[in-house]
Amino acid sequence: MGDLWSDLQLALIIIIFIYLVGWASDLTKSKKIGVVLALIIVYLTVYQHTWLLIFVVLLFFGYAFIEKFTAEVA
């Protein structure tokens, strides 16, 4: 059994990969090229620059939190 961080990292990798495959496939109009492009982006982001993944996740969830918080305050 892995530790919590490796489990969370694997879940984030899968979610990001699925999103990127859809985005890259729509962009290139080819499923094969989309999968290859998504693999390259996920590898570079997760395994080479882990801090970038953490930043994007914090930005994504932070934006949703701040948006909801400001809507309740106003």
Image (cartoon, rainbow, N blue to C red):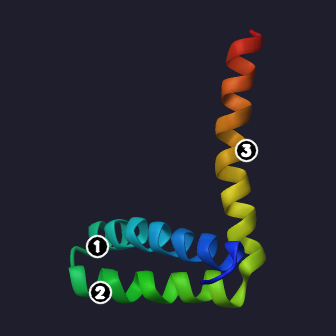
Earlier in the chain: of badge 3 and badge 1, it is 1
Do the residues under discs 1 and 2 have CB atoms within 8 angstroms?
yes
Horizontal side, residue 9 vs residue 38: left or right: right
How far is mark 3 from mark 2, CA to CA? Answer: 32 Å
Q: Name the residue under label 1.
A: 25
In percent of width and height, residue 48 lies at: 69, 90
Q: Which residue is outermost to the front?
A: 1
Relative vertical location of residue 46 with respect to residue 61 in this rendering, above or below: below
Going 70% across and 14% down the picture, which residue do you hit? Answer: 72
Residue at disc 3, secondary structure: helix
Rate crowding at label 2 as few (under 14), some (14 to 19) or many (20 or more) other CA atoms within 10 Å: some
Give the residue type that dot 3 points to: Gly
Q: Circle 2 sits on which residue?
A: 33
Q: How crowded is mark 3: few (under 14 residues within 10 Å), some or many (20 or more)?
A: few
- Determine which residue is flagged by label 3: 62
Residue 44, picture quadrant? bottom right
Q: Residue at x 42, y 81 (%)?
A: 38
User: Mark 1 is on which residue type?
Assistant: Ser
| Residue under the point 35% across and 73% down | 21
Rendered location of residue 74, percent (x, y)? 74, 9
Q: Can you name the residue that lies furthest to the top here?
A: 74
